[in-house]
Image (cartoon, grey):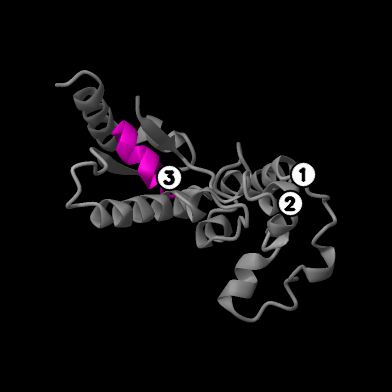
Amino acid sequence: SSLNNTIPMLSPAANSESYFLNSKAAQCCPVEFLRWGWKAFLQLDEDENKDNATTDDDADNVPEILNINSNHSMWEASPLYKNTNTRRLCDPMSDLPYDQIQEYQLPIFVSVNIADALYQEGKTLYEKLKEGQKKFATSAAKIPVLDYFEHRGSHYFGFMFDSMIEENRLKEYAKVFYAQ
């Protein structure tokens, strides 16, 4: 078995730079829908953040601009986040299960598309996993395979149209899954 994280959706705040810069890039999966998906999953009231919401008129620095229409910190009000047993479901990157990755020797593949709203989340996940791999570099139980694939394109279209990267990704999969 392996962990294959393709276009990961891991930040409930939904306020990264790629959310802002690529908000109009993927019409098949708009940013508003991604943010709504988090609100629905976390059982949040749509109006819960209205009092703390940053508006276009208020924003005068980059963090404030990124928070416009985002879930900013409202996701922390979720009953799932408040319960320590389900917190990782809300903010997966806050507590990566390195012990389980090591125990099961899971190969990990992270694939992203540069023009996607979720690009920054995938890149951040890879960086955190890379940090974890360095932490356990001397251990016999380190992450066996950690690969990162960055496609040119938006959402799944990068996989279809960036054939060189996709071919490399599939070759790496074959090495792991078919021991080639």
What amino acid is at disc 2? Ser
State yes or no: discs 1 and 2 in contact (Cβ < 8 Å): yes
Q: Which residue is mark 1?
A: 43
Q: Secondary structure at mark 1?
A: loop
Q: Residue at x 68, y 42 (%)?
A: 37
Q: Which residue is mark 3?
A: 97
What amino acid is at disc 1? Gln
In the rendered structure, which disc, 3 or 1, sits on the residue that comes first in sequence? 1
Relative side of 18 to 139, left or right: right
108 inside magenta stretch: yes
The answer to whether residue 152 is seen in the rendering is: no
Q: Secondary structure at mark 2?
A: loop
In the rendered structure, which disc, 3 or 2, sits on the residue that comes first in sequence? 2
* Magenta segment: 98-115
Q: Is residue 169 above or below residue 66?
A: above
Mark in front: 3 vs 2: 3
Q: Nearer the viewer, residue 19 or 176?
A: 176
Q: Which residue is mark 2?
A: 78
- Rendered location of residue 69, percent (x, y): 71, 60
Relative side of 157 to 12, left or right: left
Q: Residue at x 63, y 71 (%)?
A: 65
In the rendered structure, which disc, 1 or 2, sits on the residue that comes first in sequence? 1
Q: Secondary structure at mark 3?
A: loop
Relative side of 179 to 123, left or right: left
Find the residue positioned furthest to the bottom. 60
- Spatial CA distance of label 1 from label 2 is 6 Å
